[in-house]
Image (spheres, grey):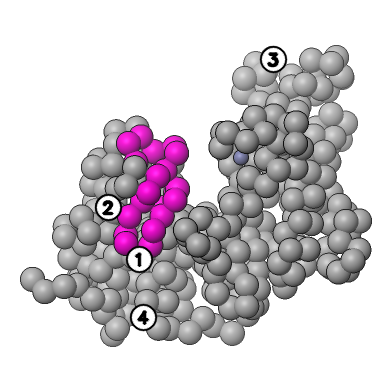
Amino acid sequence: MGALEFNMEAPYIVGVDLGGTTLTAGVVTREGEVVCTHQRPTEAERGPEVVIGNLVEAIEAVLSERGLSKSDVAGVGIGVPGHILSEEGVCVFSPNFVGWRNVKVTSPIEERVGLKVTIMNDVNTAALGEWWFGAGKGTESMVMLTLGTGIGGGVIVNGDIVLGHMEAAGEVGHQTILPEGPRCGCGNHGCIEAIAARDAIVGRALLKLQQGRKSILPQLVGGDLKRLDPKIIEDAARMGDEVAREVYEETGYYLGIAVSNLALILDPELIVIGGAIAKAGDLIFEPIRRTVAARCQMTEFDPQRIVPAQLGELSGVVGGAVLVMRKLGMKRPS
Ligand SMILES: [Zn+2]
């Protein structure tokens, strides 16, 4: 078999979102529409070979579910968490995946699936999806943040994604906001991820309860505070719970500082915020926008240009397809 190439004529692309617990493979049209998806557990704790086997099986499964053959597919694009070298097809390191150091990703999948594969960091991939087909469509410069168990980001400036010298750019979640703040998983102190991601939000609520504040939160979790999560805090805030409202207010304030830094440094047309925490909507967007309005007076960055992501859970799958579209030389829709 000769070297694989991307199939310029094929009508479909497979985009894959490799998450920490679940991976999703999707069949995507050249217009960015996801027509079929297949999910399976990542099994990240079982090491790279098992994960790559699961990727192969998901790609094969989604094609057979849609009744497609390999010749219908232009190629496969995968968003992979961690530090990725996309041209080499290698994952240098992925902190939440067991055993992922200098793992070859593209070549073993190409050998087993028989389709050309391209990879990029997962959050950069999701940002490309939102830029081509989601909230950022038609813009030239856009920053995306995803708020979940961690805080990730992707930076698009003047019509291209910024990868940096070592393809490590876009780590917006590890900017220091509180120099003496809580320790972050990256080893630094006071990163925005350590202050405003999932565990920090829950921790903020628990601290207020420990201080004896009155709240309906204990009641909402049946007295078991281990069950507390950002969604329950959001529900309480909507019921008018003062503690829960403060948690989102304070989280949004810190996020607003991080977003202000990005707005001032990069002058993006749009700042797109996605991920599970962003589903809290106005509860989190309002304090972010208010903080940005106060801190970006010099450039008068319009806080209404801070918007929610549109593709939801599919931004990674669509972004995976965009990785292939870029290789095909396709132009993004205007
Ligand atoms: Zn950090």
Q: Nearer the viewer, mark 2 or mark 4?
A: 2
The residue lying at 37 percent from left, 76 percent from top is: 327
Would residue 21 be seen by someone viewing this image from the given angle? Answer: no
Q: Circle 2: is it few (<14), some (14-19), or many (20+) Cα within 10 Å?
A: some
**Marks 4 and 2: in contact by CB < 8 Å?**
no
Amino acid under disc 1: Glu
The residue lying at 84 percent from left, 29 percent from top is: 243
Query: Is tag 3's residue or tag 2's residue first in the polypeptide sequence?
Result: 2
Residue 5, picture quadrant? bottom left
Residue for badge 2: 104
Looking at the rendering, the stretch of residues picked out in magenta corresponds to: 79-100
Q: CA distance from mark 2 to mark 1?
A: 11 Å
Say which mark, if any, is on residue 87: 1
Residue for badge 3: 223
Q: Quadrant of the C terminus?
A: bottom right
Give the x, y percent position of residue 141.
65, 73
SS of the residue under disc 2: strand
